[in-house]
Each structure stands twice: as structure tokens, then as C-alpha cells.
Image: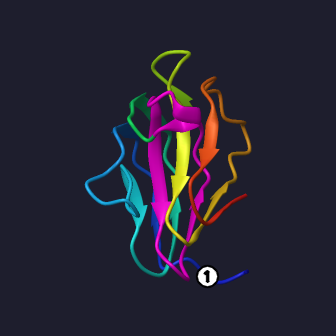
Amino acid sequence: GGATPQASIGEQLRLNGSSTSIFEGALYNAGGNTTWGGPIILESGDGQTGGTGLGVTIGANTATRLDITGQISASNDVVGLVKDGAGEVRLLSTSGNTYKGQTGINNGVLT
């Protein structure tokens, strides 16, 4: 906790799907601590949120942290978010996230 991020990215991102590997995601932090500051739009997913198959997967590798400070929204009311990987993902948007789909955790920590 409290470590200085290794990278900070502020671009808009549109995410679809989950991954080609069980511990990766449409957005995946492979090493170090990273902050994603730009807005994220969840388009469509297959990360198995609550068994619906409509979650976009975001993950973090073991002993890494991904801080998302940008707002997370979705292209429709069904798409949700799935956290995977043994690392930590922290949702830290000060303006609040607006996606309405389910949020699921397959592995690791979601704060």
C-alpha cells in the first residue's frame, strides 16, 4: 500500500471481452503498480459475471496493483465488470462509476 505508481495513463479506453488466459483481462496489469486515469467504457464481455457471460475482465498479476481513477461506464445496462488475477484492482473514481451491470470477483482483491 502507498507505493508510487510505476506508470500513469490518462487515455480513454473501450474494453471488450475477457482474455485469452484465465488470469489476464481486457485490461491487465502485468507488473508493478499502475494507475489508469482515463475514462473506461465497458462495451461487451464474456468474463462470466454471475454466470451471465457479460462481464468485461480487468486483472492484475500477483503482487501488483492497478488503480483505476477514471470513471467506468458501459455502453448498455447489461455489461458488468469481472476482476481476475491474484493482484489487486482498486476502483478510485472520484466522480463515481456509472456502469449498471453486475460486478464479480474470480480471483484476487477488488477494492
Residue 28 is situated, as x and y percent measured from the top left of the image, at 40, 61
> Total marks drawn?
1
Indicate whether residue 56 is drawn in magenta: yes
Where residue 41 sits, quadrant-wise, is: top left
Placement of 63 over or under 70, stated as above or below: below
* Quarter of the view holding residue 104: top right
Provide the residue span drawn in magenta: 48-72
Of helix, strand and loop, which one carries label 1? loop
**Amino acid of disc 1:** Thr
Relative height, residue 94 to residue 65 (above, below): above
- Residue 58 lies in the magenta stretch: yes
Which residue, given by chain and number where applicable, does mark 1 sit on?
A: 4
Kindly identify the residue that appears in the image at 45 percent across and 47 percent down: 57
The residue sitting at 49% across, 66% down in the picture is 85
The crowd level at tag 1 (other Cα within 10 Å; few <14, some 14-19, many 20+) is few
- Position of 8 relative to 79 (above/below): below
In the drawing, does residue 66 fall left or right of residue 92? left
Image quadrant where one finds the C terminus? bottom right
> Residue extending furthest left?
20
Residue at the image point whose x is 36% and y is 49% from the top: 26
Who's the residue at 51% across and 79% down the image? Answer: 62
Q: Where is residue 106 in the image (x, y as percent from the top left)?
A: 56, 54
Q: Where is residue 12 in the image (x, y as percent from the top left)?
A: 40, 41
